[in-house]
Image (cartoon, grey):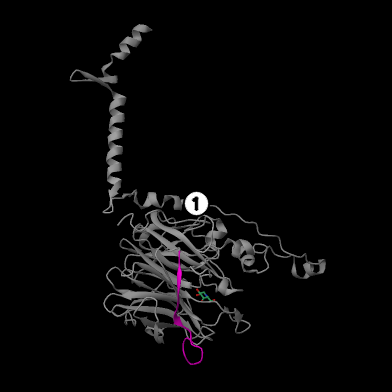
Amino acid sequence: MRMKMRNRQRKPSASCWNGGGRCSLPVIIWGLVGCIIVIHLCSLVRYKDTGAAHVGFGRRTVFRELEEVEEESFQIPPPRGKRSPRAVKRRGPRKQPTAVDEFLDESSDLRPFFFPDRRSAIGPTKEGNDSMYFCPARIWLDTEGNPIQAHGGGILFDEKRETYYWYGENKDGETYHAHKQGAARVDVIGVSCYSSKDLWTWKYEGIALPGEETNVTHDLHRSNVLERPKVLYNDRTGQYIMWMHVDDVNYTKASVGVAVANSPTGPFEYLYSKRPHGFESRDMTVFKDDDGKAYLVYSSEDNSELHIGPLTDDYLDVTRFMRRILVGQHREAPALFKHESTYYMITSDCTGWAPNRALVHAAESIMGPWETMGTPCVGGNKIFRMTTFFSQGTFVLPLPGLPGSYIFMADRWNPSELRDSRYVWLPLTIGGVADEPLEYNFGFPLWSRVSIYWHRRWRLPEGWRTAYT
Ligand code: DGJ
């Protein structure tokens, strides 16, 4: 036994001789591993001019905690009130309400789950440990302590002022139905503007574009519809241009409106409305590409398809070029963004104020063809994913410090009290393989998956502005 051990110790394969010194294989391996780790860490730590060390572990690490799947569960209460035997005979037993029925039912026991009350509001005027946390669907207060009124909105980052501006529908009026069959509505008040440096603390800058009180022939007369305002900055003219959906109470005008301002906070001067390219236009958005060219995307032909076309160089009109995309797919609420050289768009189904399933589409060229990739929603539970977390998208905000990371902005509409509609902001990332078969090109090109992660409460990672710049 002893002999065997001695022999083993001398085995050259288990140790090495180097210039008379002796080292063991594990020491070499651990030494190499250590070197690799040190080299890797050195390449990750970048020192900024400020002298502060920014750990650039890459977007995936910085955003990783936001890519964790957070489950959500809720119980749909049984149908209220039993039917009498006669009623059961005539109409059958009561059907189990769906989650969307419950969501739309003002008297549902689940109401506080979908629309938490003022006690759980977040915002800079509130004390507690929610500072800087986005809390989807909880009331969000501005710097004056008032609920933010910026629905169907979008965000512009103004480079000169290094400030974010959030524009959206001010719906702080009474909700009513103009006709029995008509959609719930609020009179046009105008487009609110809020400013922020950190995307969480929002200062109310006032109504950037007001509705019209007296002139009933004006597009923005309060009896009409003004939805989904979006603002672009034109580098050539130095102007801020707002595009919006303008309509009459029955949604038959189906037009875009254009307004212009010299400052991001307005006042915006309303210029005109039109049917772009001569077609109906309802839900819409605008998108400015890296080369400064801007595009309008709108739901058309009874919302059965989307149209896309470039704006003129001054962004004040459309050009004559237009492509029909997602034909026959019945999509609305388009929100467009770009990652590396791929264009992505998130759209909703067409179900009025009721929530439905979002889809992602991708394209190599902004003018198409566009290909549908499936739902981006991750986490919550199945019904959360099938209803876009009970909300409808409105904008996707890039986080330039973290390429491939975005904020998905959506509205949780409250059709019985539209002013109390909530904001659902969630982290959106691009990466991994798309999980639904592609319809076009036999599966090529292989777009990366777009994922929107459900979180009850989340915040942007430390250094999100500069982590990668
Ligand atoms: C769905 C649209 O996306 C909203 O902007 C709004 O127009 C509602 N329909 C009205 O029912």
Judge by depth and name the residue closer to the eye, 226 or 334: 226
- How far across and down, in percent of the image, does residue 201 sit? 45, 64
* Magenta segment: 201-220
Judge by depth and name the residue closer to the eye, 198 or 115: 198
Q: Secondary structure at mark 1?
A: loop
Is residue 78 shown in magenta? Answer: no
- How far across and down, in percent of the image, does residue 60 sit? 38, 51
Q: Quadrant of the N terminus?
A: top left
> For residue 42, which quarter of the picture?
top left
- How far across and down, in percent of the image, does residue 328 sit? 46, 73
Judge by depth and name the residue closer to the eye, 117 or 373: 117
Kind of residue sitting beneath label 1: Val
Main SS, magenta residues: loop
What residue did someone put label 1 on?
69
Measured along the vertical axis of the image, is residue 429 above or below residue 260?
above
> For residue 181, which quarter of the picture?
bottom right
Measured along the vertical axis of the image, is residue 461 above or below residue 201?
above
